[in-house]
Image (spheres, rainbow, N blue to C red):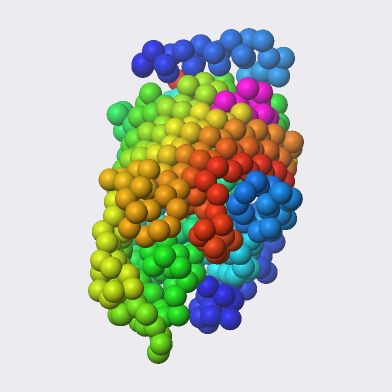
Amino acid sequence: MTHAHFLSRRLLFLTLLLSPLAASAGIIVNPDVQGRSISVATLRNIYTLRQTLWPNHQPIVIFVLPDDNPVHVAFAKEKLGLYPYRLRQTWDRMSFSGMASAPIQVKDENEMRERVRATPGAIGYTSKDTVYDGIKTLRLE
Amino acid sequence: MTASRLSGWNSLLLGGLLAASPVWGDELAGPRYHVQGFVAQGLIGTTNNRFFGDSRDGASTAFTEAGLHGTWQALDAVRLSGQVLYRHAGESDRAGLRLDYAQADWQFYQTEVSQLGLKFGKVKLPYGLYNETRDVPFTRPGILLPQSVYVDASRDLLLAAPGVFLHGASVQRYGAVDFMLGWVRPNFNSESVEYVFLGRARPGKLEGTGAVGARLRWDLPTETTLMLTYADATAEYTPASADSLAAGKVNFRNVLATVQQRLDTLTLTAEYGEPRGNPTGFGAALPDNARTAQAFYLQGEWRFRPAWELMLRHELFYRDKNDKNGMQFQAASGLPAHTMFARDLALGLRWDTTPNLMLRAEFHHVDGTAWLPGPDNPVFLSREQRWNMWLLQAAYRF
């Protein structure tokens, strides 16, 4: 890690401490996704559209909440170490140029859970590390 | 390109895009499609020269952009995508509705972290950081792209063209690398492009015969992006019946280097290019004259609030790097020296009012007229060296 990167992580961390919106988001996947945990690097590669397949070569289907949703803001900053606007820049660049599909946006956490439950290869997040029927929660390492 | 010139295949794709609703398909496990779009309206005021319409000492509303973009994941390895664009930019772009691009992408090799693919059709051309999404207002660093590097006057040449690209990407510990390498038949057939290469609109026809393009991008773990773009294009001129030009050839090649560093809420970007135009065989009215231009900008963007961004940019453009102040050109042609250079200082403010609505304001102080759009300023001698420009833009996405 370079100094610049370290510094930016520190700033994000400070922002989060001061933010009342920060919630501990849980990573959820469709039960057919293998494994119990996911690394920060892999999560970031998935959400920046660089990793498109699970280890068993199943296509990854990404779900997100709207850019200004507090759970999305917390997920982006806390789990990915990226500001929501930078994620949006990447998605716009990749999708409008035809190089990738942008993540699928859902309106709230209920829809997020329904879509992740129903979609093979799906990944998403919720505000709490709660266990839900028909959804698998991944440990972030 | 006008709507009437679309081929049957293109019309079919266009129709499909228009018929689709702006949501993801609901068959979750089956084929998926996605449609998104935008509408933007600008307001431009200038002193001394005109930019995108009748902007001098007033306000021009002749800057409108709208796009409808569709993607269909037909198979796990095949994605079809395309965009219909409506654009009006003063006298420089009155074509209205057109098919921006329509491509098929076949990813024939995929692992968890690497992809290799072939895209073909009317494909988006890789050129620097912003070219492939240059008409999507949200993806630009300002209302206008840096005119030095992304010259709107020759945009038709840079946008999209029929051809094929091999592309690959891989993410590793040292960062993410991707490349593109391809061949297209470039589009020289527009009035603005004729201004750039032949001095003004000509009665004959300038048509692209072929071009190779390559781009290498490396995103380092330090939040640094390095990129190198190369393009080499050729066009042939067919004179009209009474034409002062002979059947000549234009060769255009460009090397562009890009550096971007992201530091928390700050983004620093610089791009440097040396485009070289070489018209040959046009006869006495347009002597052979190979010229290497120089284009450079340095830009800072600062997201000082989650929805607010400030942009400051300085850019330089010299149409002949061996005659930066244009004095040799003036002595030889009698035309003003300031048409050979442009130095622009721009300040911009962006407000993402909601995730769907963006408002922008921008101010430019320009010394030189090198990238002034020709069709908006047809009389060389009435162009003035120093001018200011302010712009406002509202953009909505869905």
Can you give x and y, in whole percent of width and height, for residue A93 in the image?
51, 46
In the rendered image, the vertical position of residue A31 relative to residue B71, given as above or below: above
Measured as percent of width and height from the top left, residue A78 is found at: 56, 20
User: Residue at 63% across / 37% down in the picture?
Assistant: B363
Return the residue nearer the eye: B352 or A104. Answer: B352
Residue stretch rendered in magenta on the structure: B301-309
Q: Left of B121 or right of it: where is A22?
A: right
Q: In the rendered image, which quarter is residue B200 located in?
A: bottom left
Q: Return the residue found at the far bottom.
A: B241
Q: Choose between B284 and B74: the one closer to the eye.
A: B284
Number of marks in picture: 0
Where in the figure is residue B155, as x and y percent of width and height?
A: 47, 58
> Looking at the image, which residue is at 36% across and 40% down?
B272
Depth check, front residue: A123 or B311: B311
Residue A131 visible in the displayed image: no
Residue B304: in magenta span = yes
The residue shown at (28%, 76%) is B283
Q: Is residue B48 visible?
A: yes
Please identify the quarter of the rendering in which residue B269 is found: top left
Q: Main secondary structure of the magenta part?
A: strand
In the image, residue B108 above or below residue B299: below
Residue B398 drawn above or below residue B100: above
Give percent across and percent down for residue B289. 27, 61
**Residue A49 inside the magenta-drawn segment:** no
Q: Is residue B357 above or below residue B9?
A: above
Q: Name the residue: 49% across, 64% down.
A: B192
